[in-house]
Amino acid sequence: MSVTAEQLNLSPAVAAAPLSLLIVDDHGPIRRALTARCEHAGYRVTTASDSGTALAAALHAAPQAAVLDINLPGLNGFELAERLLALNPQCQITFVTASQDPQFKERAEALGVRAVLRKPFDSAALLEHLSTCFR
Amino acid sequence: MLSLWDFGSQSRLVRSAQRPVRILVVDDDQADALLCKALLERTGLAIEVDMHLSGIDGIAAAELTPYDSVLLDFHLPDGTAAGFTDRIKVAAGDPCLPVIVMSGRSDEDTVLDAIHHGAADYLPKDRMTPAALRRTLENAIEKSTLEREVTVHRTGLIAANEELRRQNREIQSFYHTVSHELKTPLTAIREFNALLYDGILGPVNADQREALQTSVQCCDQLTRMVNDLFDAARIETGKVSLDVRELDITELLRQEVEIMQSTARNANVELVAKLEGSLPALRVDQNRIAQLIFNLVGNAIKFTPAGGRVEVRLERCPELSCYRVSVSDSGCGIPKEQLHRVFDRLYQVAEGDETLSAGLGVGLYLCRQIVVLHGGEIFADSELGAGSTFSFTLPTATVAVSAVSAQDQVARLL
């Protein structure tokens, strides 16, 4: 079962100034659920349903972290991650995917991203990972 | 005992004598060519003979006429049979066309060279008789007919194999799509339930929390079913391999049993672990072994009535070459006549018992495949009404890392 943000011992940075988080998923219900979860954990959340909107939002919101679906319309999650990292190399990327493509993990690692969460995931694992990015 | 080419009293050549046998004779010595033609006409076969005096002319003739066989002199003014044999076959568009090389006795070594270049046989000119010619022709044509049949079958098999591979790819792609499409809404359902359970969307009372917890557990159950189905499809196409790492197997089992405790409590089944500790680490695929334990313990709980007991044991085999993990339950047991089928794909418990029908019938099949991939063995023992024991062994010897495809590593949960 998921845990709440209070149980996660978030870093003082998160507690002091909300970190900007970009959530990109073409499935609306997943976006809404993740937004509720992450806002409750203290993040300032921006969402997008495709890569183009995500890049425009990233220019405006300057996210410090991004949770990206991989199968997206237009640019896929990997290509989007490349663009986001070009804008801000410090941006902490986490991929979420319902796909079991065994090559996804390798492609993520090639971008320096270790975190590939398989859907459906326990959001406690996601929040735990996000918090470790900023410890 | 029959020789390879002894097909009975009548050869295929004679049996299929609806049309004359067409023979091309290529010999620069016209007298030899005429003699050859005369001998052929005395073989008792219905025969049509064309004669040419050079290799080039022979090639041109083979291009125009579908011959059943070619009798080729070894020494020709424009080359030797070693060079012309293949060119005549290419010109005829028939790699199985039987070319028989004729030679003087002193040429035997070079004739062998022609055989190496694809000639079907050779005939020494000084031993050429109607009977020898007939026998050689029948054998060569029979052999080439068989070669053609083999080629046709082989081509058919290659095409069938390619078609199976294509269908496999299609099935893989279909399972992949189904898995993806099912999991996307499942992710939202699970997360919204979890948000409610965690009170993030407003306060919930104890009964509601319990209902939401069950709902999340059902989502997880559905996820495992989708994963099992996908894994079963991948295993059948040989696409599952292991991501082996050195692991404390005792600790892994302890964690897995702990995860299953809530399921056991819900079913009012006592779940106990008797794990031998301080065992040397084992090279295994953590996710796959966890999946294996989950399936075996989950089954044991499912088939054990309330008040029953499930016991997980880990011990070293007496000969120290493997570890043995066993999952015993005090459930309904499995009839003896079904015991040998429990690891079969799509095996289900006896029809008619609605309470036990949950499951896709791939769980134990996957268990067996996971154990086999680790080089171990899996066993099922049971007595009707007295419970069942499923056990498996994991060899202590390192699982061959070469069997592991890095590309095939499944994206793992953090």
Image: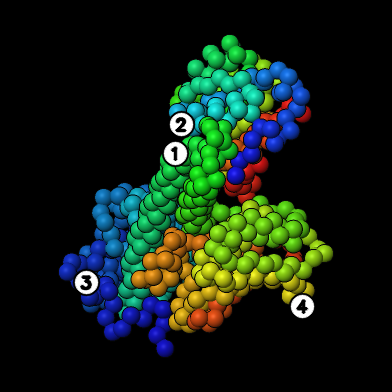
Question: Looking at this view, is A6 or B276 the one in front?
Answer: A6
User: Is the N terminus of chain A in the top left, top right, bottom left or bottom right quadrant?
Assistant: top right
Q: Which residue is mark 2?
A: A29
- List the single residue furthest toward the right: B278
Q: Which residue is mark 3?
A: B16
Q: Nearer the viewer, mark 4 or mark 2?
A: 2
Q: Earlier in the sequence, mark 4 or mark 3?
A: 3
Q: Amino acid at mark 2?
A: Pro
Q: Nearer the viewer, mark 4 or mark 3?
A: 4
Within 10 angstroms of label 1, few (less than 14), some, or many (20 or more) residues?
Answer: some
Residue B100 visible, this angle = no
Determine the residue positioned at 43% across, 61% down. Answer: B358
Are the residues at dot 1 and dot 4 in contact (C-beta closer than 8 Å)?
no
Are the residues at dot 1 and dot 3 in contact (C-beta closer than 8 Å)?
no
Q: Amino acid at mark 4?
A: Glu
Please tell me whether mark 3 sits on a helix, a strand or a loop. loop
Residue B185: image tag? 1
Q: Are marks 1 and 4 on the same chain?
A: yes
Residue B319: image tag? 4
Question: Looking at this view, is B68 or A58 the one in front?
Answer: A58
